[in-house]
Image: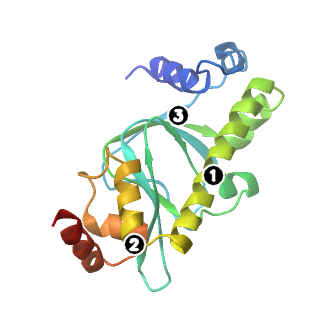
Amino acid sequence: MNIQKQMNNFIDYFCSPGSSLEASDFRKYGLSGELRHLKKGQYLIRQGQPAPKIYFMLSGYARYMSVSSEGKEFTQSFACAPCVAGSTRAMARQAKALFSIEALDDVLCLGFEWPDFFEKMKDQPGFLLAHSTLLESMFIKKEEREYSFVQLSAEQRYLDFLEQNPQLRERLPLKMIASYIGITPIALSRIRKKING
């Protein structure tokens, strides 16, 4: 597996048209990621453990999930390549992760130690702009998700999920989708029956 090719894919992701970040900004500081391959069911990070790395998912998809003290699973969000994954809190505060990231398919990713990565790139305006854009996107998604739980019905949350995640609708077990939209699998079955007539 050609790690240089995967690094180029990572650089291309950040250096998209309109970005002020140049590939040379990464290369001149000698950034090198650790290439990881996860099988379905393996974890990129685990709840309750340190998670100091930022990951760039090159292929596959995963879910952010947590387990309550009673052992109940909660699906918080999904991540589909290409994308950045990790725990901002764990990286920034050198704390333990509050959730796990579980591979739902074979996942190929590059991992970077966040303190080293940020230290090398923090003086690059292009990187700071890309980082700011990424955080902005994360906050918007968080705000919209919180709004959906307060203002939208379970049926509308399910319809929004299907619209926003067409690549996942046939690939996820119903219990996982139900958990994500905050209802039981039985309630989701009723909604699907109603929608499908």
The Cα–Cα distance between marks 3 and 1, rounded to whole angstroms, is 29 Å
Q: Residue at x 36, y 40 (%)?
A: 60
Q: Amino acid at mark 2?
A: Ala
> Residue 194 versus residue 111: which sits nearer the camera?
194
- Residue ranking furthest to the bottom: 70
Q: Is residue 46 above or below residue 194?
A: above
Q: Quadrant of residue 178?
A: bottom left
What mark, if any, has residue 126 been given in the picture? none
Q: Report the residue at 28% width, 75% height from top.
A: 185
Q: Is residue 85 above or below residue 131?
A: below
The residue sitting at 57% across, 63% down in the picture is 49
Q: Mark 3 — residue?
A: 34
Percent position of residue 69, x then y: 50, 83
Point out the frontmost of discs 2 and 3. Answer: 2
Label 1 crowd bin: few (<14), some (14–19), many (20+), radius 10 Å? few
Q: Residue furthest front?
A: 197
Work out how far the residue at label 2 is from the one at label 1, CA to CA, in angstroms. Answer: 20 Å
Residue 9 pos. (x, y %): 49, 22
Q: Is residue 189 above or below residue 70?
A: above
User: Mark 1 belongs to which amino acid?
Assistant: Ile
The residue pinned by badge 2 equals: 154
Q: Which residue is mark 1?
A: 140
Which coloring applies here?
rainbow
**Of callouts 3 and 1, the N-terminal one:** 3
Q: Please name whichever residue, 155 or 185, is drawn nearer the observer in this view of the structure.
A: 155
Q: Quadrant of the N terminus?
A: top left
Side of 197 where 32 appears, left or right: right
Which of the two marks, 2 or 1, is nearer to us in this view? 2
- Which residue type does callout 3 highlight? Glu
